[in-house]
Amino acid sequence: DIQMTQSPSSLSASVGDRVTITCRASQSISIYLNWYQQKPGKAPKLLIYAASNLQSGVPSRFSGSGSGTEFTLTISSLQPEDFATYSCQQSYNARTFGQGTKVEIK
Amino acid sequence: QVKLQESGPGLVKPSGTLSLTCVVSGGSISNSNWWSWVRQPPGKGLEWIGEIYHSGSTIYNPSLKSRVTISLDKSKSQFSLKLNSVTAADTAVYYCARDLSIAAAGGTFPWFFDFWGQGVLVTVSS
């Protein structure tokens, strides 16, 4: 099984900050890595697919990078609506999610 | 716009079977997609349960494989989840989702969950 580990588990940031979340895979997964945003009581929303491709309708302040075992999600300038939990997910072999990173208001 | 809607009992007794259905609208369930189940225990992260291809092929999370069955009913445009021998640890919000693949750079065909149902809370309790 492929394990996905995110860091940090939570972070506090202010509006306008640049935020970076890291996701590591227990083995190489090429670029088969997706990022989701989830707000309380809501279903996850796809942000980034295949490591760096922005899903249609997602603001350009979100970006993804990486390949192999290490990936990052960056929010260039945090907006009030971005306070949420972010999860990575691999689709290289079956499917596995990271444990999530909660972005809170500082 | 594809829409998915979960339904099923919100309360299941321990050792019983959890049964949920997901109805797909706005798109064909017969397209070349996987149709998935994902769950989220209260206050915890997302866990992939398994999925079914339009052909009927299935793949399951190894940690749940012995207890899970996912089936497809194309005539009703729906797919279903059965999880048996449930315990309190199976209490969660259960989501259905579409697992889509598209051609991407470098000849890759990544898969990702692009449409989700709103989720249904299932509590395991006597």
Image (cartoon, rainbow, N blue to C red):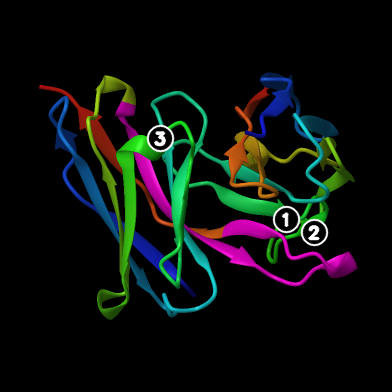
**Which quadrant would residue B67 be assigned to in this image?**
top left
Please state which amino acid type lies under the numbered disc 1: Tyr
Looking at the picture, tell me which residue is in the foreground, B40 or A27.
Answer: A27
- Tell me, yes or no, whether the two marked residues, 3 and 2, touch with CB atoms within 8 Å: no
Chain identifier of the residue bearing label 3 in the image: B
Q: Position of residue B43 (x, y in %)?
A: 44, 23
Question: Which residue occupies 67% across, 20% down?
Answer: A10
Q: Position of residue B113 (x, y in %)?
A: 57, 56
- Tell me, yes or no, whether the two marked residues, 2 and 1, touch with CB atoms within 8 Å: yes
Chain identifier of the residue bearing label 1 in the image: A
Chain identifier of the residue bearing label 2 in the image: A
Q: Which residues are drawn in magenta?
A: B90-113
Q: Residues under labels 2 and 1: Cα distance?
A: 5 Å
Q: Nearer the viewer, mark 3 or mark 2?
A: 3
Q: Are marks 1 and 3 on the same chain?
A: no
Indicate the secondary structure of the residue bearing disc 2. strand
Q: Residues under labels 3 and 2: Cα distance?
A: 31 Å
Residue A49 got which mark?
1
Q: Dot 3 surroundings within 10 Å: few (below 14), some, or many (20 or more)?
A: some
Q: Which residue is mark 2?
A: A53
Quadrant assignment for the N terminus of chain A: top right
Q: Which residue is mark 3?
A: B64
Please state which amino acid type lies under the numbered disc 2: Asn
Residue B106 sits inside the magenta stretch: yes
Residue B23 sits inside the magenta stretch: no
Question: Which residue occupies 12% across, 28% down?
Answer: B13
Question: Which residue occupies 57% across, 51% down?
Answer: A45
Residue A40 got which mark?
none
Indicate the secondary structure of the residue bearing disc 3. loop
